[in-house]
Image (tube, rainbow, N blue to C red):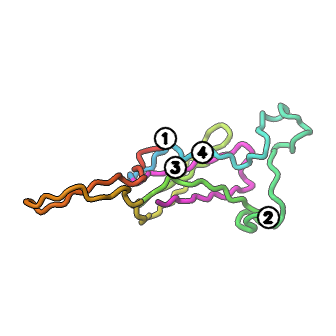
Amino acid sequence: MIRVRLIVLRLRRYASDTWFEAYGDLGAGTIDYAHPFPPGGVRFWVEAGERNGHLYDGHLALRHLDSVDPDGHLETVHLEAEHLWPAWLMVVDSPAYVFGRFDHAVKVFDGAGNTSSGSPAQYAVTVNAAPPAPRRFKCTGYDSGADQITFSFHGSRFEPIRGI
């Protein structure tokens, strides 16, 4: 079983209340936007305080018009984002997959829950992994007239992915 690691860059253009959710099709062919992967909504700037609007926050306590401080110079993924501003990698793992083609998507939301009108970023991966072996496999009988052997076993610990 394999998990797919979805990596989203935390860019400085995302405000303190911006967040994202990762979705997948679980092999069905259509991405299920009603059920995001755990943990659900992931804030880009967890360490930043949420904003209540202009002049409602401690006006001189937070940065004026924004409460996001960028990462330090040369930290994280340098030069992946805007000029001289580093980006931070945000990670979400998919459920465990065994075999098939799996589509994923990431939607970014603002503080009011709005998302852009364009298509969300999508990523497809093909997984070719074997499920765990069955447990307690043993011969339980033999029918000499039909020349058939009967076996018993407990199924693998893998459970089909039917939702999250």
Left or right: residue 121 versus residue 61 is left
The verdict on residue 62 being magenta is no
Measuring from the top left, give residue 100's x and y in whole percent: 39, 61
Residue linked to disc 4? 39
Q: Could you tell me which residue is drawn at 78 percent across and 33 percent down?
A: 52
Q: CA distance from mark 1 to mark 3?
A: 8 Å
Q: Amino acid at mark 1?
A: Ala
Location of residue 59 in the rendering, given as x and y in whole percent from the top left corner:
89, 36
Please identify the residue farthest to the left as the structure is shown: 145
Residue extending furthest toward the right: 60
As drawn, 152 above or below 114: below
How far apart are labels 4 and 1 at the CA level?
Answer: 14 Å
Which mark is on residue 105?
none
Can residue 155 be seen? yes
Q: How crowded is the residue under tag 2: few (<14 C-alpha within 10 Å), some, or many (20+)?
A: few
* Residue occupied by mark 2: 75
Q: Looking at the image, is mark 1 or mark 2 earlier in the sequence? A: 1
The amino acid type found where label 4 is placed reads: Pro
Question: Which range of residues does the magenta coloring cover?
Answer: 1-27
- Which residue bears the numbered disc 1? 34
Spatial separation of the CA atoms under disc 4 and disc 2: 26 Å
Instruction: Please tell me whether mark 4 or mark 3 is closer to you in this view.
Output: 4
Q: Earlier in the sequence, mark 4 or mark 2?
A: 4
Q: Nearer the viewer, residue 118 or 120?
A: 120
Relative to 92, 122 lies left or right: left
Q: Position of residue 118 (x, y in %)?
A: 54, 51
